[in-house]
Amino acid sequence: MIIFLFWILGGLLVAQWYKNWDQGYGKGLFISILFSPVIAAIVLLLSGRKARTCPKCAEKIRMQALVCKHCGNENFEPGPKEKLKDSMENIIG
Ligand SMILES: [Zn+2]
């Protein structure tokens, strides 16, 4: 029963991570419940990140975007430190 709870909670966490990376909350939850949260996390890491956060308006934009669709910001090339911080924040939520 405890394992079942961890399974669900882990699934919800991984699903949130999927959402942050623009891979779809439902997809993350589906893979987590069906296989396991660990498998879902590995699948996400392998498929890669598809979204990032605009430093100016904090809206989510596509990873490949050169211009923010929300505020028109063109200046986002975060340094390695910011990149790490950003990805950590995304994992934590
Ligand atoms: Zn923006």
Image (cartoon, rainbow, N blue to C red):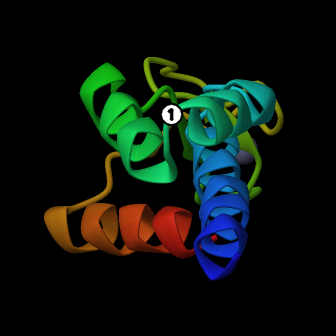
> Along the line of sight, which residue is nearer the eye, 33 or 66?
33
* Coordinates of residue 72 in the picture (x, y in percent): 72, 31
Task: Look at 50% across and 33% down and name the residue there.
Answer: 35
Q: Residue furthest left?
A: 80
Instruction: Tell me: residue 90, above or below residue 37.
Output: below
Categorize mark 1 by other alpha carbons within 10 Å: few (<14), some (14-19), many (20+): few
Q: Determine whether the residue tagged by mark 1 lies in a helix, strand or loop.
A: loop
* Quarter of the image where one finds residue 82: bottom left
Of 26 and 78, nearer the camera is 26
Residue at the extreme bottom: 2
Left or right: 39 in relation to 16: left
Q: Is residue 47 above or below residue 29?
A: above
**Horizontal and vertical percent position of residue 69:** 76, 24
Side of 70 relative to 85 (left or right): right
Ligand 1 location (quadrant) = top right
Can you identify the residue that label 1 sits on?
35
User: How far across and how far down the image is residue 37, in percent?
Assistant: 50, 50
Number of dots carrying numbers = 1
Instruction: Compare residues 12 and 71 and report the one nearer the observer.
Output: 12
| Amino acid marked by disc 1 | Phe
The residue at 46%/38% (across/down) is 40
Q: Position of residue 45 (x, y in %)?
A: 30, 37
> In which quarter of the view is residue 22 placed?
top right
Which image quadrant: the N terminus?
A: bottom right
Q: Is residue 49 left or right of residue 93?
A: left
Question: Height in image: 58 above or below 34?
Answer: below
**Quadrant location of the C terminus?**
bottom right
